[in-house]
Amino acid sequence: MNNSYLFLVLILALSLLTAGCMDASNEEKVIASWNLSPDGSIGFSVPETVIEERVLEEGRNLISTDLIFKGFAGDVHAILVSPKNPAAFLVWAPGANNPAAGYAEYMHYYPEHGIGVLIMDVRGNGGATPGYPMNIEKDAGLFMQGAWPEFYLIAADMISAKEYLKKIYPDIPIYAVGDSNGGRYAALAAGSDPDFAGYIGISTSGFHHIGEEYTSPIREFLLSIDPDVQVARIAPRPVILFHAPDDPVIAFTEGETLAVSAGKEAIFIPFNGTHGVNREVDERIIALVSPS
């Protein structure tokens, strides 16, 4: 056997080895996608996200960090406020027109009680994350084109945030939380991803299974974004709902209806206030998610 022949055999072997490595890598790569069932249940595949971190504040028992998630659908901003040794985490989607920066100082209350909060800069809320305000008609059009509706993207953003926290704190429960419209996004995140420890909705509501009034495929899309559909999929994980009887934006009865959709194990808590979170709600959340 001459040297030229040996050289060719070696090159061929190396080529096959390299090809095998390339195939394995491709098989492991996660492609951004969703899997939607006829009943409206949905799951998301979200690629691993690179995160840029910048410490904003560090005290004796508080770390505040600015986060940029370099995701498959553009950069998403968030602010993390955490104690040094958190007992639980909340991935929080604020209501309409409320950027993360507007919640950050208020949320310092949670680390004081051992709970961390990752505040999403929700797409379309006017913060650092680009997007448009909730627009179901526009989202339906994108869905029909096979593109990502923003409603789905926001849920995927919350899932990416949960995965980020899970890597740092693998044994700590992480809840999907939101107030007003943010509660609707959080319901989809928790309903589609069983890794969330539970769901907390404040001053929010569902869409009354309106998808049933339409034909496929819009029917399935509308069911998938409906909190009335998604909360039923969260059990046996906890579903905790807060609503003020004097809410001027979303009627108290709407919150009650969402609680019925969630099932008998759901916790529905009326509170003194109007629309959105307040310290009475904060104290109840802290008591409910803190280890007993």
Image (cartoon, grey):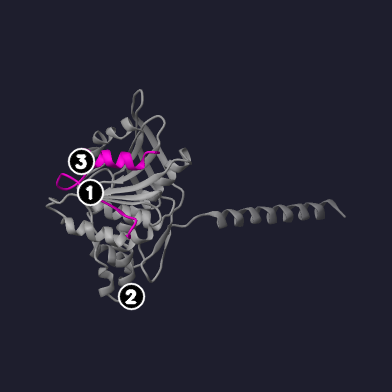
Label 1: how many Cα within 10 Å (few below 14, some 14–19, many 20+): many
Of label 2 and label 1, which has the lower sequence position?
1
Q: Which of the numbered marks, if any, corresponds to residue 95?
A: 1
In the image shown, does 162 or 175 lie closer to the viewer? Answer: 175
Query: Disc 3 on helix, strand or loop?
Result: loop
Q: Which of the numbered marks, if any, corresponds to residue 216?
A: 2
Q: Residue 248, how many percent across, how many down?
A: 11, 52
- Circles 2 and 1, Cβ within 8 Å, touching? The answer is no
Q: Residue 24, how many percent across, how many down?
A: 61, 55
Q: Residue 70, how many percent across, how many down?
A: 39, 45
Question: Who's the residue at 36% across and 42% down the image?
Answer: 289
Magenta residues, as a range?
263-292
Is residue 123 at least partly visible in the picture? no
Question: Who's the residue at 27% across and 41% down the image?
Answer: 284
Label 3: how many Cα within 10 Å (few below 14, some 14–19, many 20+): some
What is the CA distance from the residue labelled 2 to the residue labelled 1? 30 Å
Quadrant of the rendered structure where residue 56 is? top left
Quadrant of the rendered structure where residue 39 is? bottom left
Q: Which marked residue is nearer to the observer: mark 3 or mark 1?
A: 3
Please check the rendered image and state whether residue 269 is part of the magenta-colored stretch, yes or no: yes
What is the CA distance from the residue labelled 3 to the residue labelled 1? 13 Å
